[in-house]
Amino acid sequence: MITVIYAALFVVATLVLVLGLGVKLWSYATTPAPLKIPTTPAPITRPGVVWRLFREFAFFESLFKANKWIWLFGYAFHLALAVVLLRHMRYFIDPVWAVVAIAQPFGVYAGFAMVAALLALWARRVLVARIRYITEPADHLMLALLVAIGVSGLMMKFVARTDIVMVKQFFIGLMQFKLNPLPGDPVLLIHLGLVAALMIVFPYSKLLHGPALLFSPTRNQVDNPREKRHVAKWAEKLPRRQAAK
Amino acid sequence: MANLMGSIPDEADPLEIPALCEGAMAALRSFPAKPEHQTALGFPGELVENWQEKAIEKMGDLLTKYRSLKVYMDACVKCGACTDKCHYFLGTGDPKNMPVARQNLMRKVYRRYFTFTGKHLPWLVGAEDFSKEVLDDWYTYFHQCSQCRRCSVYCPFGIDTAEISMAAREIMDSIGQGQKYSNEIIGKVFKIGNNLGLPPKAMRSTLDDVEEDLKTETGLDIRLPLDEEGADIMLVTPSADLFAEPHIQGLMGYAKVFHQAGVKWTLSSYASEAANFAMFIGSYDNMREVALRIRKAAEDLKVRRLVFGECGHAWRVAYSFLNTLAGPFDFLDQNHPVPQHICEFTHDLMQEGKLRFDKSKNDAYRLTFHDSCNVARASRMDPTPGGQFEIPRAILRATCNHYFDMAPDTIKEATLCCGGGGGLLTDDLMDLRMKGASPRMRAMQEVTREHGVTHLAAICAICKAQFTKVLPAYGYRANGILSVHQMVSNAIVLDGSIQQRELNGEGAAAIETAVAAS
Ligand code: HEM
Ligand code: SF4
Ligand code: SF4
């Protein structure tokens, strides 16, 4: 019974994540940016823009300029998250890729680092008056969700171990539309339930921030307005009033 | 330090973060537009009856037209990186002047009407109905943003509060809740051709006066032509350049540079305004109308090049938007950038060795440079990214012996707004202007303590007007603000001028005879 419920849950969560994200990103991609508004100094070539975006994704360059503490905690969290996600790939592929194998020993440290960095970010939300002012219940909830995912994950490593071979078979099976039994350990069920919740809220919450960066006109536009005319379709159709010729 | 009236305080970090002071600026509301200011721009005269419905409809419309708005409404993670980046927050401590909090005024309405969570769980994401109180907050705080984009430099996703305040102002205009200052000015451009409402006759008589002054000063016939067909260059400059100090000294500088370059140039009375205020109200339509005047004037006068005078957001509209709004400019000479900034023009001549300067003429000034936000963060000067920082500095260093930069985290892309940009240069917002200028002024005080700096140069008409008001409150004289081309004007040694003969060691008597004979 648990197996069926969780299988259904992950099918739904995956559909919501993929379709929801797809619809959102499609709507970003198809909404015009009628004016050239890169925050300058900006690259004057397309490869330059790719490099700018790469630096934002890989190093959080603007955040680094802004605030070293937020950068440190935020960067540590995301880096740790990336390692943890990489490590989790072993549940979905067989045989595992070399990078995933290499990531294994770091995975545990990354788990701790992730939770620690999240707690530090959370502390800022509570302790710094400016950030407390802009914080909404949803922001706390998101941190709570991620911390809970991290802590329940670490518990399976150190406190209440589960049968990870069975877990892997469950997910590999799911990917081939086959039902393999999932262990009934409560901590595992909590961990997986929260992950599914995260997947479901992803397209409808501030978690959109990662992919959204790709579509931000202040970051992704080439600074060449004098050389190349840039006009949106809707703007072309605007009727002219007086100065027309 | 001849120019300092009061004393400069010992220590004051320009970027010091104030304690939160809720509601500190809630009572300061810019004067609303009168019905006639609204209707001239195609907006309803006063708040329409079903304003809430109309506003939400307009927001929905803008969300399909501007990707910036759409992405920025969703992308904010409330990380707080921008919270201490706005000069209005630094100057007032009002938390609603923190960029993310300003955005949230719109975001809470967006969420309520356009997102699932906001519709069904508003308390979770801070969503709120678009009530009259919210609209009042919009009006207050979206007119306390100078659209300077400092926040967008630091946001990890490039969220630009300027885009949001422009959209908010457009929504408010569309329901009849416009701001007097900006809308009245745009109306003047449609009616007369410039922000100050100077008719062609008044322009010509000012230009005559300037020609006379230049004759006395240099002994040369330096012309300032108006509406002359067939000139090489049409100069589009803020109308303030024909009206007030120190702007007008900048105009003299342009005229001298054109004279020395030997180019035929002209101003246009039809397009006698570079400063396109329609940008401030986020109105593409009105911005394009103003921009099209420039195109029409260039076509009518059959010029071959377009050069813009010193003005920050004018240069943003010219550099970043003009080609979009009024292009293509294929009828102009393609061997030069269209349009070109007067600083680019002067700098090119300097590089070609065509300008000679006597720096000692500016020895009375110990100078620093204020990067105007729209030039710094929303435009460029050739040839490389960052040319907008280097070129004005190169001109100042070539024309003045004592030049000092302010602290690195307050200049170039990190520059602090003068406090008067974005349609806020109005007396009804004087309290905000004074407070918003304080980070910039404290940065200036630092270089005064360290290097005895007395003067500030800028390439923006708004900055110049704003600093004239603000400087006295911080221990400087009102005329401590200078045009960059004023420095050029002071130092340039024109061929055949009195200054050239002086420099060549001719005696005063000889010069007088020569001038009398000419
Ligand atoms: C894909 C590329 C991504 C980029 C470039 C990115 C970037 C950032 C940045 C710059 C911040 C602000 C600094 C901070 O508070 O940490 C942030 C915050 C955050 N990110 Fe990401 N992120 C990405 C993906 C993700 C993913 C996949 C998740 C989670 C599933 C995530 C969860 C969060 C959370 C929860 C916060 C807010 C932290 C807080 O409340 O203070 N991010 N992200
Ligand atoms: S654009 Fe400038 S004035 Fe507006 S919120 Fe950002 S920093 Fe403040
Ligand atoms: S820096 Fe950007 S993401 Fe962070 S709070 Fe400000 S607007 Fe939001």
Image (cartoon, rainbow, N blue to C red):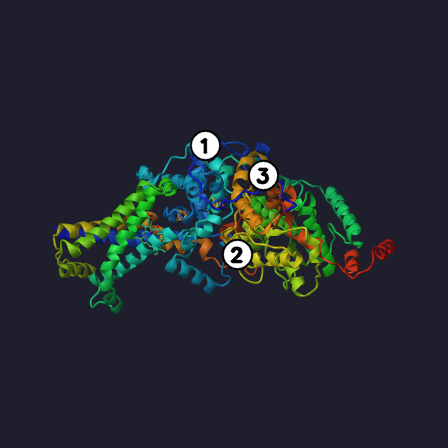
Asked whether the beta carbons under mark 1 and mark 3 sit within 8 Å of each other, the answer is: no
Residue B280 falls in which quadrant of the image?
top right
Q: Residues within 10 Å of mark 1 (few under 14, many from 20)?
A: few
Q: Chain of mark 3?
A: B
User: Split into 4 quadrants, where in the image is the C terminus of chain B?
Assistant: bottom right
Q: Is residue B51 above or below residue B456?
A: above
The residue nearer to you, when weighing A220 against B376, is B376
Residue B203 falls in which quadrant of the image?
top right
Q: Which residue is mark 2?
A: A230
Q: Amino acid at mark 3?
A: Ala
x, y percent for residue B485: 67, 53
As helix, strand or loop, the secondary structure at mark 2 comes to loop
Q: Amino acid at mark 2?
A: His
In the picture, the disc for residue B473 is 3
Asked whether the beta carbons under mark 2 and mark 1 sit within 8 Å of each other, the answer is: no
Cα–Cα span, label 1 and label 3: 45 Å
Q: Is residue B308 above or below residue A127?
A: below
Cα–Cα span, label 2 and label 1: 36 Å
The reply to whether residue B341 is visible in this rendering is no
Residue B494 in the figure: left or right of residue A111: right
Q: Which residue is mark 1?
A: B50
Asked whether the beta carbons under mark 3 and mark 2 sit within 8 Å of each other, the answer is: no
